[in-house]
Amino acid sequence: MTAENKPARSTAPQLRRALTIAALAALAIAITRSGMVAVAEISMHGKKADVMLFGLAGELRMLLAHSTLAGLGVGLISLAAGKRRVFTALLWLAVLPLLYSALAAWPWSQDGQIPSWNSNTGRVASGGLAFIALVLVCLAAWRGRRPAGEDWLARWSVAATALSTLLIIWLAGGEVLRAATRQKPGKVLHTTRVVHEIALEPDLWDVLEHPPGGQPRALVITPSLDYRIDGGDRPTLVMPPPSRVRFTVPDDGGQVWLKGSTGVDAIDPTRIGRRFRSAVVRFAVEVDGREVWHSNHVIKVRDQDGEELAWQDLRDIPLYPGQEVQLKSDLIEFEGGQAMPMLAMGFGSLILEQRYGKQLTSATPEAPNVVLIVMDTLRQDRLSCYGYDFETTPTLDSLAQRGILYENAYSSAPWTWPATASILTGLHPETHGVLADGECYLNSEIETLPELLGKRGFLTGAFSCNPLIVPNKNFDQGFDSFQSKPAFQQSSRVIGDIRNWVRMNSRTRFFLYVQLTDTHEAYHPIPEARARAGGKFPSDPPLERLHKYQARLLRGEGHDAQGNSRLDEVMPPAHRDWIQHAYDAAVISADYYVGEILDELAGQGLMDRTIVAFTSDHGEELGDHGMLTHGHSLFPELSRVPLILAGPGLPRGLRNSTPVSNRHLAPTLAAIGNAVFEHEQEPLLLTLPDTVRAQPIYMSTQQGWWNGSSRVDIHGLREGDWEFHWAPEGAAWGAEEPPKDGDWRLYHIARDPRARRDLASEYPERARTMLATLRQHIERARGSRTAASLAAGRRTLNALGNIGYIETEELPKAEAEDSLKQRED
């Protein structure tokens, strides 16, 4: 047959097949991307499935649009199969990046959901996506070489089914997912309550057996310092093998579940002897004499992989009052030396938990939602609504005009752990016990604001961008959901999740806690904020040097023998000027993200039935008293914080000058839910400004710096127009030994709002009177403490060093290392 007589090849089947392949490829890309997000969000980020699905619903149309565009590229590959090689190669070069971007959802998805090439996990994920893209293109090219007339993909019915499926998902998929996952009034939400923390309640258990020198006790252990491994700090009932611990299940009103994990503290090879090579330890749980769970841990000096280092979770064990539980550890294999080293190992985060259901209700102006926003490290005097001469906070200015602004609000402490614990409990630091790296665990016996509101039917959720406010320090106590990471997060990475949370729960009454860190160095201001703040960016930006500058200042290099500041000799003036502008830019950014949250509340129609409270955990020193960062003093730049409340039923545009503490937020917000803390039977309610009367304001830090000495306790008192700072072990500049009563300073804050002039020598009687008041408070607050705390583990200590709270050379040895003693033969 001649070429002229050869029948023309019909293009209709080829086009139908290309459309079918495009639709199927789009569906495959969307499903692959959704599956990857589900795995990352649930297994790696700890999100609940319904939260993940609701977030996915909001991105579904964008995902399908991107997938469809990439799918069309795959369809073109099939259509071009067998055509000119140059054209086909160029098409491949164009389609492959498009496919990869669709699978990675770049650039429109949230930063945390786009695989990064900066980590091993990200590189593996990116490589996998690139491989999937290549497979899709190869399959399309292979299919395109087959005769279209014989290919079932070229049938109209197949093409119509694929395209209609894509269209239906586009039109209705997001709404179906939202409807299925949105919380609704009347729904019973299943939640939990911790009733006992086994390790922290030694009266609950008896020791039946232990090795010489290995008495079971409560410690914090850290199986791994690698943040990619679930091996972080946990309070642990340490049980070196062979050990037996027994307890009887208390009667707390019904069935409970035993939850926890087992782990071995990270090994320091220099402390366990040269001969030790490996061991296998078996942990087990018996209930009424019957073993119900066990797990083996492999311990090696070297070549320990991530899975072996990670905590191993117990399966949840149901228990009833009166049952006898035995916890056991046994050595079943050992290699190297004549004796097993006394390693710290045992049952971590071991709790008895109750499960119950609470019926969700809807919010009204009379029974409003509660939103508490804490902006980390935000000093009061940099907000324009507090008199700053540069407009930094238009959103917060507007919020203050709609509500109450407290002009003289104080934090309970100048750094995160104790200050945040006070905000959530209403207690002084000396009472709740979260004081420093030696005591940083919020005990479950202490009532928290989310616990009280949860018992009143509130749905409770939290987002923490600060790596110190995390579940392994028990700050998730009382929250139905708690999102955090072991590193500082920029607001841009979580604001989408916060907005989704509000949308998902907009029909129910909720308590939302948000702790953002835009004003905590290192600063990452939005471009608009950087432009508005101005300032010349130095050729050698000081961000990485701030901790080094502060370390030198803490060593006394920033002051002379008489205590006069020599900050310019430590930190160049250009860097000091830059940090002022950088901080202003950070404040502008912080205000922007607060606006994002308020805009979402308004968009959901919730502003007329939501009380919004805004504050900071503490301020920031920018050279005011010759120092940097925070935690080291009680001067106004650190202790004074913004405090604003707005919402239905509150006065509008009211400014109150009465000195108050932001720890009063806990009883105030609890009262909105008709709840009362046991320790606050007559609470000071910030929502009723006419009833707020002046009373002493107390603050403290155990991270203090006093006249050249570091890590000194400092206690403070604001009473009337006076402010008093006392270091019980402090001494004057140049003194070799502290006096019996320590050292103190006195300021008249009304005349000296920046606390520049110490008047202690001019008003000795006033100082002595305030010292007596402060001592009585400390004794009373410590006497009210009923719950134990625990020290930081090594991973947390590393984080504290990275943040700058403690110097690297000052890192205290983790207490668990004390148990690394070689057992005698």
Image (cartoon, rainbow, N blue to C red):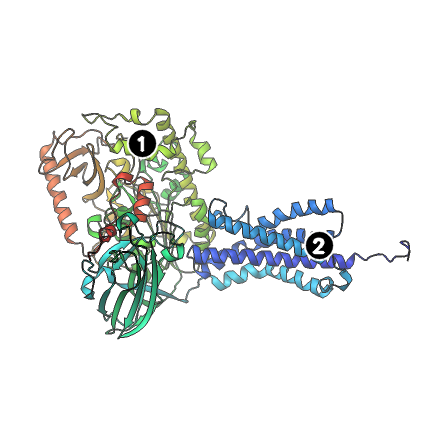
Residue 361, percent from left and from top: 39, 63
Q: Which quadrant of the structure image shows residue 653?
A: top left
Q: Nearer the viewer, residue 330 or 550?
A: 330
- Tag 2, which secondary structure? helix
Q: Which residue is mark 1?
A: 549
Asked if 758 appears above or below 617 in the picture, the reply is above
Of residues 540 and 696, the one drawn nearer to the viewer in this rendering: 540
Residue drawn 52% across and 49% down? 109
| Residue at 30% from the left image edge and 72% from the top image edge | 291
Dot 2: few (<14), some (14–19), or many (≥20) neighbours within 10 Å? Answer: many
Q: Is residue 475 visible?
A: no
Q: Earlier in the sequence, mark 2 or mark 1?
A: 2
Residue 711 drawn at (x, y percent): 21, 40
591 lies left or right of 753 = right
Q: Nearer the viewer, residue 341 or 202?
A: 341
In the picture, the disc for residue 78 is: 2
In this rendering, the answer to whether 109 lies above or below 577 is below
Left or right relative to 85: residue 25 = left
Whole-percent x, y for residue 629 in the image:
31, 36
